Image (spheres, grey):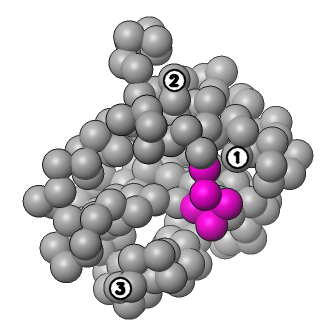
Amino acid sequence: MSERFRVIDPRSVLFGLEGEARLNVLALVSARLWESTGLGAQRIYRAFEEDVQSGYGGGVNGALLAVARVPEARDVHWMAVRLRHPVAIADGDAVDLVFAIVGPDADPMLPQVMRCFDRVTRDLPALGGLRNARSRNPFCAELAWALERASRPSAIAVR
């Protein structure tokens, strides 16, 4: 698992994205994810909406984990987003980090990648490093460290 995150593809990172609300941010992310997935942006966005309606797409520690389960996806793709300003989400909290994942339920990597990003949302030092990054390259370095750490469950204390 950790090999998957050793080098962060800069196309998997959006730094300083402007957004007004959770669904607006997810629409912008969907438009970027279609490039790597080959799926339509509207298809990805609808899957994110389904995730939100199911109650899963909530924020933890100012970070949103959004999952688009798309059966026709060939494999798992993800994107990390640092928002320029926090945006409100449905439960009244605000988020400034978004981790978006797209993949088919049948892919065994999907739950592993979801667990890894879920651990990052609960790792306060990692979130602090991501928030303190002032540009894309330091953000990518912090993200690589956070994901490497999160891929080793024993490295993060259970909260």
Residue 15, above or below 129:
below
> What is the magenta range?
8-12
The mark nearer the N terminus, 1 or 3, is 3
Q: Quadrant of residue 131?
A: top right
Residue 76 spot, x, y in % from top left: 33, 60
Question: Residue drawn at (71%, 29%), measured in percent from left and top?
Answer: 128
- State yes or no: residue 71 in magenta: no
Quarter containing the N terminus: top left
Q: Main secondary structure of the magenta part?
A: helix
Residue that mark 1 sits on? 140
Q: Amino acid at mark 3?
A: Leu
- Of mark 1 and mark 2, the one earlier in the sequence is 1
Disc 3 target residue: 39
The alpha-carbon separation of the residues under discs 1 and 3 comes to: 25 Å
Above or below, 145 relative to 12 = above
Q: Which residue is mark 2?
A: 149
